[in-house]
Image (cartoon, coloured by chain):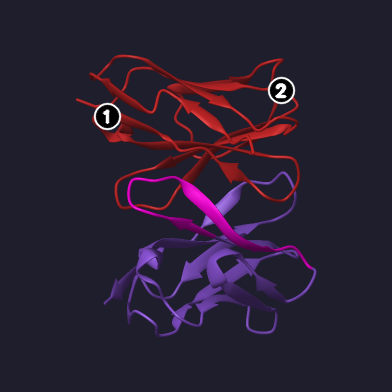
Chain colours: A purple, B red
């Protein structure tokens, strides 16, 4: 079984300041982990993925995430938030290739000017 | 690059009617997934197909059925629609670990 917990349902940051979205996972085997972003009334876009290679993963739009097995965490960060980063972010776990995705509850990011 | 195509994008149905949602995966992707996202909720896995065979099943109601055809497109059939079926339905396709999502079909049941 696998599960994902996003520790913050809402995060509010000022434009130009760092963003941190926290995610903890549970999996009975080596998981694949993803972050997806969903802008209002839009589909899901893959930001980055971890599939047992480098633990620090760089994604699109300046986002990166670090896989920490000892802490079962996969937190998403960005050094400087932009207004266009306002969206819902989902931390997602998959057991292996071809397996269903299990989504966290989502974190809604608000960026203040 | 080609993306996942879903049709229709919006659908309005009345209670007890039926609906058919279509998904066209990225070329050469052999696996298709269906997810349901209710208002303010995270997406929930419904069902998946690999090489035209059902590969996994999630919280899909018995009123729903799906299949994948020889050209790899998939259809989700929903019968006896209920108000609670109103949601955004996503299709995703993959050939390995990454799942690429379509824009979704927004189903409204009145």
The structure residue drawn at horizontal position 75% and vertical position 49%, both measured from the top left corner, is: A97
The magenta region covers A36-52
- SS for tag 1? strand
Percent from the top left, x then y, of residue A72?
63, 77
Q: Nearer the viewer, residue B106 or A72?
A: B106
Q: Which mark is residue A24?
A: none
Q: Which residue is rendered at x = 41% and y = 23% of the image?
A: B8
The location of residue B68, given as percent across then percent down, is: 64, 21
Residue hosting label 2: B52
Please state if A79 lies on the left or on the right of B79 as rendered.
right
Residue at x 55% of width, y 72% of height: A62
Q: Chain of mark 2?
A: B
Separation (CA) of disc 1 from disc 2: 28 Å
Q: Secondary structure at mark 2?
A: loop
State which chain disc 1 sits on: B
Residue A23 placed where, x, y %?
52, 73
Q: Is residue A44 magenta?
A: yes
Relative to A42, say whether B11 is above or below: above
Against B109, residue A106 (above or below) is below
The quadrant in which the N terminus of chain B is found is: top right
Which percent across, then down, holds residue B89?
Answer: 43, 35
Q: Residues within 10 Å of mark 1 (few under 14, many from 20)?
A: some
Find residue B108 and name its label.
1
Using the rendered image, report if marks 1 and 2 lie on a common chain: yes
Mark with earlier residue (1, 2): 2
Of all residues, the one furthest to the left in this rendering is: B110
One can see residue A105 in this view: no
């Amino acid at each position: 079984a696998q599960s994902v917990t996003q520790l913050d349902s809402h995060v509010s940051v000022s434009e130009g300041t760092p963003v941190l979205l926290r995610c903890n996972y549970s999996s009975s085997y080596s998981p694949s982990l993803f972050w997806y972003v969903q802008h209002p009334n839009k589909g899901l876009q893959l930001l980055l993925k971890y599939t047992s290679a480098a633990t620090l993963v760089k994604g699109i739009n300046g986002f990166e995430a670090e896989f920490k097995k000892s802490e079962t965490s996969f937190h998403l960060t960005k050094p400087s938030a932009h207004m266009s980063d306002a969206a819902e972010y989902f931390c997602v776990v998959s057991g292996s290739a071809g397996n269903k995705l299990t989504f966290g509850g989502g974190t809604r990011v608000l960026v203040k000017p | 690059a080609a993306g996942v195509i879903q049709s229709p994008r919006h659908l309005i149905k009345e209670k007890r009617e039926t609906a058919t949602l279509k998904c066209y995966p990225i070329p050469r992707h052999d696996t298709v997934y269906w997810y349901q996202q209710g208002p303010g909720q995270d997406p929930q896995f419904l069902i998946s197909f690999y090489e035209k065979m059902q590969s996994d099943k999630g919280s899909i109601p018995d009123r729903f059925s799906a299949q994948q055809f020889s050209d790899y497109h998939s259809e989700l059939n929903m019968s006896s629609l209920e108000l609670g079926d109103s949601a955004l339905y996503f299709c995703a396709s993959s050939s390995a670990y990454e799942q690429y999502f379509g824009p979704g079909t927004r189903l409204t049941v009145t």
